[in-house]
Every structure is written in C-alpha cells, then in structure tokens.
Image (spheres, helix red, strand yellow):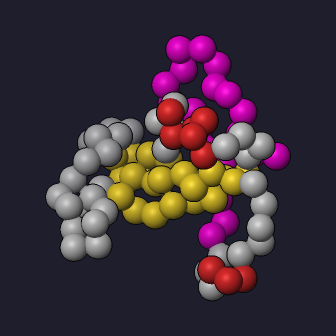
Amino acid sequence: RGRGEPMPKVLFEPVPVLLLSPALTNQFKDYPHYNCPVYKTAERRGVLATTGHSSNFVMYVRVPTDRGQAHWTKRGTAIILSLSV
C-alpha cells in the first residue's frame, strides 16, 4: 500500500505504471494519500503560467500513504517524467 522510504543515498527510484482514469473530484475515494507533484524534468522549474503553476508542472497524483503530507514534502518527493534533458 503506497511507497515506503527509499534506500539510503538513492536519489531516483522507478514508479510503477499508473492507470489514470478521469473522474470528478467529488467522486474521488477518501483514503490517506500524498498529493505528489509530477514534473516534466528534474529541474522542477519553468515559466510561471497564468494558472500559477510552472510550465514544467504536469499534475498531482494521489499516492496512498500512511504518513502525512509534510513527511513527503520535506523529502522533496515528486514524480519526474524525464531524468535526461
């Protein structure tokens, strides 16, 4: 259920294949999760768009976890779509 802590000194770890199914937010199941940001590249920066998000930002993925949002945010946890530029 969800991802655990990475091994020491491991900066990148593969994410399992995700199946994305469109749904209205009021139809989301309620479970403990981390809103994990998804970025195109590891730079995590880009031109700020009118939406307030970086052009490098793609979306949030709800990752099941038994730890709070702050735990994963402090660790800089994110999904990177391309490690090479």
The image position of residue 73, as x and y in percent, is 51, 40
Q: Residue at x 48, y 53 (%)?
A: 37
The image position of residue 63, as x and y in percent, is 66, 53
The image position of residue 36, as x and y in percent, is 54, 51
The image shows residue 35, relative to residue 65, as above or below, that is: below
The image position of residue 64, as x and y in percent, is 73, 52
Which residue is farthest left? Answer: 47
Image quarter hosting the C terminus: top left
Which residue is farthest top? Answer: 8
From the viewer's perspective, is 80 left or right of 6? left
Q: Residue at x 63, y 51 (%)?
A: 34
Q: Quadrant of residue 67?
A: top right
**Foreground residue among 45 and 66:** 66
- Across the whole image, how many numbered discs are drawn on residues? 0
The image shows residue 8, relative to residue 31, as above or below, that is: above
The image shows residue 16, relative to residue 75, as above or below, that is: below
Question: Which residues, given as a range, are shown in magenta?
Answer: 1-20
Q: Residue at x 72, y 33 (%)?
A: 4
Q: Residue at x 49, y 25 (%)?
A: 11
Quick check: is 16 in the magenta stretch?
yes
Quick check: is 13 in the magenta stretch?
yes
From the viewer's perspective, is 56 left or right of 38? left
Q: Main secondary structure of the magenta part?
A: loop
**Is residue 23 among what the camera can see?**
no
**Is residue 62 among what the camera can see?**
yes
